[in-house]
Amino acid sequence: MGSLFRSEEMTLCQLFLQTEASYACVSELGELGIFQFKDLNQNVNAFQKKFVNEVRRCEEMERKLRYIEKEIKKDELKIPDFGENPKAPAPKEMVDLEAQFEKNESELREVNTNAEALKRNFLELTELREVLKKTQTFFSVVNLPNIVGEAQHALVIEESGPAQAVQLGFIAGVIPREKVPPFERMLWFACRGNVFLRYEEIQQPLEDPHTGEAKHKAVFMIFFQGEQLKARVKKICEGFRAALYPCPESTQERQEMLRGVTTRLEDLKMVLNQTEDHRRRVLVGAQKEIRNWIIKVEKIKAIYHTLNMFSFDISHNSLIAEGWCPVQSLEEVRRVLKEGEKLSGSTIPSILHPLKTKEVPPTFFKTSRFTQGFQNIVDAYGVATYQEVNPMPYTIITFPFLFSVMFGDAGHGTLMFLFGLWMVIKEKSLLSQKSNNEIWNTFFGGRYIIMLMGLFSIYTGMIYNDAFSKSFNIFGSAWHSTYTDGDLQGDGETATLVLDPGPFYRNGTPYPFGIDPIWQSAKNKITFLNSFKMKMAVILGISQMVFGVCLSIFNHLHFKMIVCLFCEFLPELIFLLALFGYLIFMVYYKWLVFDVTESGCAPALLIQYINMFMFKYEDASEKTDCDVQATFYENQQTIQTIFVIMAVLSVPVLLLVKPFYLRSLHNAKTHPPKVEKDTSKSVNGKSKPVGEDVKVSYGHALINHGEDEEEFEFSEIFIEQAIHTIEFCLGCISHTASYLRLWALSLAHAQLSEVLWTMVLHIGLSMDMQYLGGLIIFVVWMFWANLTIAVLLVMEGLSAFLHTLRLHWVEFQSKFYSGNGYLFQPFGFKHILDIDSLQEIK
């Protein structure tokens, strides 16, 4: 659990691996997934790296697998995922894999080429058959003696004498249906009306052999006179990509040709079926193994890509690597290195040597499925600086709680909790589906957050005594009104109750848990709840800010910045408590001291708070009547004056002390007393440990535990401290006001819920219909339920989530969290198991 509150302690390690054992050792490290390698060949050209040829071979295998996978999906075959995790094959097995992929690819390509040629031939024969059928129909049209006679009649040149027969020629073919109108117009204009066109649509769509799409086509016949028109018509047909087919002029020849074409089509269909069966068998065989093939190839590629980051020691025939590793995992790394040596058969052991460096280590938190979502919320603001306090453990409680304050409704919270609980229970089955829907993946990734937000919303809904805008009278109301039944039903002078605690609240015992249900019917309900929720929002907000300031203590102590403890933490805490902590005190004091009998003399906190800064006081002992601006406890003027002076004095301390103190330290180091030469370095010149040399940018100061320091700039440090001071002082005011969103969104959610109940469901329940009542209530309930889910659960829930996110990022984390680190990204194969398709990494 220690790593939850502060990132894991990291160390920079150097690996010495023998060339023959390097592949197996890196493979085992990838299975472990706890070592982040550094690229030692950043300045080396990619084509000059040692294992670039192996990477190219892996990319070629990827290309072949991608082709096989595309063919499998083209046939709508599902690639099974049995959850297997095969280990990376040995380098010698790459040859077998390449041969297997080459065989499958070449076989598939050959089958596809043959199938495409057969389909093209089948298409041509089908079109020829349709041309012969339609031509036969054209020449035997009912009520026309001869289509040639019709064409002759249309194309004959009218002269003074009787019409003379002309010798006509014709061509037939097939054209896509959508091209027929422009084709007809082009023939008319190009041939000046000297051609005769007849066409008829083919009822059955024809399959394109290249794309596999079904296309609608039409058969056409064009009659013309002379070779010149024939050449022009053929040119037009070529331009429109129309397929021309030979068509005999005599009926007997056409029938014989049709019978031959039909026989060839039957034979071709049989061959096509056999080809498709063979292709299917090849794909089914590849379907069972392609998942394992993809994992193996991706692992091999990842290993060789990592090996390209190593430097090569020619003299010792070894590879040298550097990388980050958690200190607690060093023994595990040594163990898997020994396993890699055994697998490779190497007799020379690998060496793991921790280094001492001045580099800032990466940030690494060990998280579970439950805590990962909350850690992602924190990391979205900024990755924690190395060894900085992690806000995530506190966010687990504060995030769903602040959300529930704005979303407080036991009914809506129950629906949200059940949705989150369902995702948690069905976690394994939902994970196995590997959905590509981003919205669903976002909800599923935050399943534990949704479940907790719903659970906390049930609690705050019970505090508000609000469930779908209705209250539950479980313990009995503590109020005793004098209203008559007519007043309660709206028949008297008073249509709604106005609750006055003076005459009505005589029982000194409050409602045991939450808000008294009688407020649901009160006319002054909003006035009461507004006062309650606004004060609650201020109390919660200031408490969280104080907690954030207190967390900064652990950062100051851990980084040994004692000056920050006295020059930042104490002034910030004094400023925050003297001004805003005192406001919380006044709220509780007013609640505890002034009861219903003295409510008329209760102080106005807003006016009292303003008078505190204006040093304007009125003594209550000098007044005979009640005055909300008068002091309400002894020595109030003295205490408030002290608090204001303390807050004002803390500002220059926060602004000036730290910069001048750091300058004095720098001046002392610039002119140090003469001492003997530092011998802290070892004889071989190695650097100091990580904990002694690491230079960490924490907050607004550069913490340097090593010897070499950056150039000291007093003006830069002073400006940064001034910005921090202004930001904190003004932020305390703006952040306190920002927490009022807890009150505003809670009020908006409650009012929207009440509007939906009053304007929708209440109307349906009020209808008095003997037979249609049940149907109407069901329809109205469906409408109300859909609006409740869409508006109140989804839209209002998202709004409350975003506001809670802002409160944590800006108001809470800004008090102690700098977020200037970078994530620990170890080399591992876990992401490879999540790959659904090679198309994702194309």
Image (cartoon, rainbow, N blue to C red):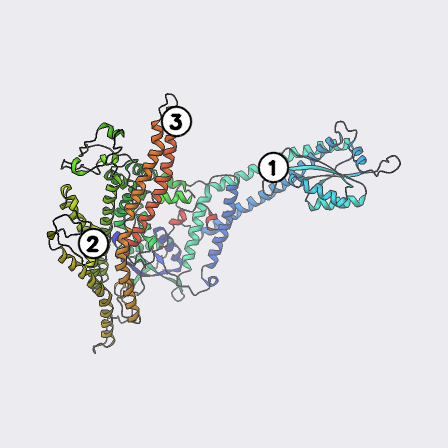
Q: Of tags 2 and 1, which is closer to the observer? A: 2
Give the quadrant of residue 430: top left
Residue contact at pointers 2 and 3, CB within 8 angstroms: no
Residue contact at pointers 1 and 3, CB within 8 angstroms: no
Q: Amino acid at mark 1?
A: Leu
Give the quadrant of residue 471: top left
Vertical relation: 80 (above or below) 364:
above
Label 1: which residue?
A: 272
Q: Nearer the viewer, residue 90 or 249?
A: 249
**Mark 2 residue element:** helix
Q: Position of residue 126 (x, y in %)?
A: 66, 36
Residue contact at pointers 2 and 1, CB within 8 angstroms: no
Q: Is residue 393 left or right of residue 28?
A: left
Q: Amino acid at mark 2?
A: Tyr
Q: Is residue 743 left or right of residue 269?
A: left
Give the residue at the far bottom of this rendering: 674
Q: Position of residue 363 (x, y in %)?
A: 31, 57
Report, in whole angstroms, how far the alpha carbon at label 2 lies from the one at label 3: 55 Å
**Mark 1 residue element:** helix
Report, in whole angstroms, how far the alpha carbon at label 2 lies from the one at label 1: 90 Å
Whether residue 817 can be seen here:
yes
Q: Is tag 2's residue or tag 1's residue first in the polypeptide sequence?
A: 1
Label 2: which residue?
A: 609
Q: Nearer the viewer, residue 357 or 662?
A: 662
Mark 2 nearby-residue class (10 Å; few <14, some 14–19, many ≥20): some
Label 3: which residue?
A: 776
Q: Nearer the viewer, residue 639 or 426?
A: 639
Q: Of tags 1 and 3, which is closer to the observer? A: 3
Mark 3 nearby-residue class (10 Å; few <14, some 14–19, many ≥20): some
Vertical relation: 354 (above or below) 112:
below
